[in-house]
Amino acid sequence: MKLKKRKLLIDQHDKYGMWGGKFGGNFVPETLKKPIYDLEILFSKLRNNQKFLAERDKYFKDWVGAPTRFIKLNNLSNHIGGAQIWSKVVSDANGGAHKIYNASVHCLLAKEAGKKFIVGDTGAGYAGKMLSMAAKKFGLKCKIFMGAKDIKRQRPNVVAIKKNGAEVIPVYTGSQTLVDAVSECMRYWVANCDTTAMCVGSTVGPNIFVKICGWSTSQISRELIVQIKDKFGSIPKRLKLYNCVGGGSSSYGFWSEFIRYDKRQVELIGVEAGGPIKSKKHAAPLTYDSKIGVLHGAMQYVNQDKIGQIDETESISAGLDYPGVSPLHCFLKDLKRARYTAASDEQALNAYKLVTKFENLRPSLEPSHAFAVALNEAKGLSKNTIVVVNSCGDAIKDKNILKARLGKNYDKLY
């Protein structure tokens, strides 16, 4: 199957909701088919409704803070040598991460559907934080499901979620991380879908949730393509776009407008979580050729054992600590339109130290994975090559991890 260049990737699925006939779909219990169908109808209607689009754009501009900056990292470029290094600073958005786009759209949809409650999952805490912010903004009651392990390591975002009036539901099953939080959130929605909307925090899950999230985060690339043309006059002849990949929401949003370009001109590089160097566990199903399986209602590449049970993952980054990945990224991998690799915990920490040493930028551990690969590869590239890294989250949530790994004065090292 080939990409249709004039059609958004989120719409290039068959009647069963499958991309390339292999990824995605709606593998859900019978009780969820009606609420999913209702959401599909509502989204299909509103995504082309000018009044709804105007309302979305107003909130993105006046509340979220669009557009976020596109800046050249001069000091890093000079230090590394080779390619020019730029960053799309999506962490400038209200709340400090890209998750605000998806959360805002889901709350707008919930209000249109007459729902008074909304639930969501979170790993790094950003999806939960942003949903709690948007729920408060739009007058909705909110519950956030979060793994007990992630509650401990992402404490700053947990505090923020509670301050916004949302309830945090700890999940003690399985690995007590994002994968388990998504599962529990979906179970809750099955029992409460008549009164409650669900916001899946990334481009994962049944087809409609992949589409809504991808459509929402595409705001990033809609801004970026304009900003690049303003800076360079046109799309550069050699442009490389680096993004971390966990569930895949920020990377799809970062790439959406550029997927139609020839990969010899615009290369898309996704960086997964390779985990600790001394561990066999990772969260990189695309990099390490995991098998196709069903997770959270969708077919995808997913870490699994010999009998098909989901493997536990390990990563310093809670936002990337997920055994599966978006069906969209599985499709892009199979088409060879995007290239996927991984960075270890240690490489991400070193990249964080390097970026903060030379620039006034504090990327969270998620985009630090992308910086690790981008900075390493930039060395061997010409100065005519433009490298852009999506700094999709700030490091405030990671302060306890950084303090433990880099010392109590980690934020004053440089």
Image: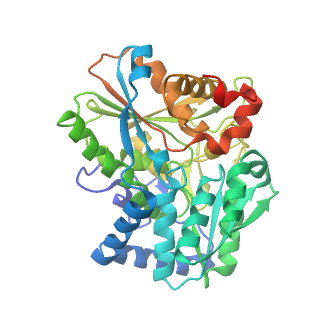
Please tell me which residue lies in front, 286 or 178: 178
Name the side, left or right, on which 311 lies relative to 356: right
Residue 398 sits in which quadrant?
Answer: top right
Q: How far across and down, in percent of the image, does residue 197 sit?
A: 57, 75
**Residue at 44 percent of width and 66 percent of height:** 16
**Residue at 36 percent of width and 35 percent of height:** 71
Name the side, left or right, on which 325 lies relative to 389: right
Please tell me which residue lies in front, 279 or 163: 163
Q: Quadrant of the C terminus?
A: top right
Name the side, left or right, on which 282 lies relative to 366: right
Residue 349 showing in the rendered view: yes
Name the side, left or right, on which 344 lies relative to 44: right
Please tell me which residue lies in front, 317 or 356: 356
Residue 214 sits in which quadrant?
Answer: bottom left
**Does 340 appear above or below 41?**
above
Residue 1 showing in the rendered view: no
Q: How far across and down, in percent of the image, does residue 379 sit?
A: 42, 15
Number of marks present in the image shown = 0
Q: How far across and down, in percent of the image, does residue 287 sit?
A: 54, 33
**Residue at 65 percent of width and 23 percent of height:** 413
Q: How far across and down, in percent of the image, does residue 216 sit?
A: 42, 60
Please tell me which residue lies in front, 168 or 23: 168
Colour treatment of the image = rainbow
Q: Residue furthest left?
A: 233
**Does 306 appear above or below 134?**
above
